[in-house]
Image: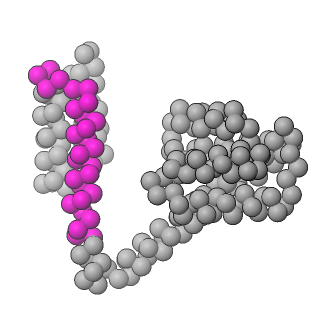
């Protein structure tokens, strides 16, 4: 497939990814159906197998789940004729998907910092802290108990409890706790 994208086409691609950035509540993965509709269905810039392969490759690679976005830009550029267009496609799609959400996050953080003495901002922060901690604990509980046998894995649960208490009641840097946990795991649990 060889395309001949005009500057207006590239601008349209950029604008579409700008809009998708603001719709990506829960991450860019949530916009995959719309990307498929646009790139494969409406524009025909990427074939269905190329689209699916880009998603599969990006999701199987380590790193952030947004890796499929530059791969799709790469595919559009390659289909336009060269590696240079592919690099341009990566730039267009990544800047498009990252710019609005990063700008909005930066502006909200700056506003929150400037207005940190307002009662509503303090209340929001104080209200979000326990919610954030409880969601993290729930996630850890689900991940920890999914493949765990309490009768066999009780030392790991005890280590988790000890680490939790250290974090809650001391100023020990988290990296030291991570290093200690890795060392204890390596020394005592690597043979299991």
Does residue 6 lie above or below 79 as drawn? below
Does residue 149 lie above or below 171 as drawn? above
Quadrant in the picture for the C terminus? top left
Residue 61 appears in the rendering: no
Q: Is residue 59 left or right of residue 162?
A: right
Q: Give yes or no for residue 108 being in the magenta stretch.
A: no
Write the residue at 77% across / 46% down: 45
Percent x, y of residue 55: 59, 38
Indicate how the structure is coloured in the image.
Answer: one colour
Percent x, y of residue 59: 53, 36
Quadrant in the picture for the N terminus? top right
Q: Residue furthest top?
A: 191
Quarter where residue 122 is shown: bottom left
Q: Is residue 170 left or right of residue 112?
A: left
For the residue pair 187 and 69, the one nearer the viewer reads as: 69
Percent x, y of residue 19: 61, 63
Write the residue at 13% across / 40% down: 161
Write the residue at 73% across / 50% down: 42
Write the residue at 18% across / 30% down: 156
For the residue pair 12 and 167, the one nearer the viewer reads as: 12
For the residue pair 45 and 64, the one nearer the viewer reads as: 45
Q: Main secondary structure of the magenta part?
A: helix
Q: Is residue 170 left or right of residue 80?
A: left
Does residue 52 lie above or below 39 as drawn? above
Q: Give yes or no for residue 149 being in the magenta stretch.
A: yes
Q: Is residue 95 left or right of residue 157?
A: right
The magenta span reads 125-152
For the residue pair 164 and 54, the one nearer the viewer reads as: 54
């Amino acid at each position: 497939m060889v395309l001949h994208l005009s500057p207006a086409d590239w601008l349209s691609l950029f604008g579409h990814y700008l809009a998708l950035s603001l719709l990506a509540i829960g991450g860019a993965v949530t916009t995959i159906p719309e990307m498929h509709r646009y790139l494969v269905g409406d524009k025909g810039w990427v074939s269905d197998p190329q689209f699916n392969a880009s998603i599969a490759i990006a999701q199987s690679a380590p790193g952030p789940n947004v890796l499929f976005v530059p791969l799709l830009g790469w595919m559009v550029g390659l289909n336009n004729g060269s590696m240079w267009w592919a690099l341009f496609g990566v730039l267009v799609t990544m800047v498009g998907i990252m710019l609005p959400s990063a700008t909005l996050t930066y502006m909200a953080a700056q506003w929150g910092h400037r207005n940190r003495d307002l009662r509503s901002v303090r209340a929001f922060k104080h209200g979000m802290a326990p919610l954030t901690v409880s969601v993290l604990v729930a996630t850890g509980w689900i991940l920890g108990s999914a493949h765990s046998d309490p009768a066999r894995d009780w030392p790991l649960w005890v280590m988790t409890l000890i680490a939790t208490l250290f974090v809650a009641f001391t100023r020990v840097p988290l990296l030291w706790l991570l290093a200690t946990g890795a060392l204890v795991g390596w020394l005592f649990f690597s043979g299991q």
